[in-house]
Amino acid sequence: MEKSVRELKTLLREMILELGELKERVAYLEKDVAQLHSPVPEVAKDMQIGIQGEGYENLGRLYREGYHICAYAFGQPHQEDCLFCLAQLEKE
């Protein structure tokens, strides 16, 4: 009887350890799933907003100064509105 009680205690200890490992795995997987559903991680999102805002402002300034910002004629002076440049500005 004493042997079976020790065996049960050993089994119970092993099950508790395995349960702890499984809880850690589930938490890790839930974190991964949350990141997959999030379009951009929070830290990168903050960085991207700052970079996008500054880059967008610079592109707008260049276009207002009379230069193309589209991929087709970037940096060349424009005489009238360019639909590609305007589309680029609206995309941002």
Image (cartoon, helix red, strand yellow):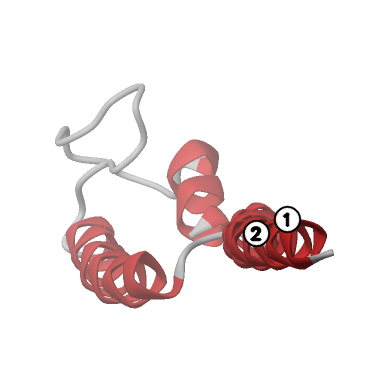
Q: Residue at label 1? A: 7
Q: Position of residue 35 (x, y in %)?
A: 59, 59
Q: Secondary structure at mark 1?
A: helix
Quadrant the N terminus occupies? bottom right
Q: Amino acid at mark 2?
A: Thr
Residue at x 73% of width, y 57% of height: 3
**How far apart, in angstroms, are the residues tagged by discs 1 and 2?**
5 Å
| Percent position of residue 82, x then y | 45, 42
Q: Nearer the viewer, residue 24 or 88?
A: 24
Contact check, label 1 and label 2, Cβ < 8 Å: yes
Residue at the spot 41% in from the left edge and 70% down from the top edge = 45
Graded by Cα atoms within 10 Å as few (under 14), some (14 to 19) or many (20 or more), the crowding at tag 1 reads few
* Quadrant position of residue 77: top left
Query: To which residue does mark 2 refer?
Result: 10
Question: Where residue 8 sits: x, y (%)?
Answer: 78, 62
Q: Is residue 11 left or right of residue 74?
A: right
Q: Amino acid at mark 1?
A: Glu
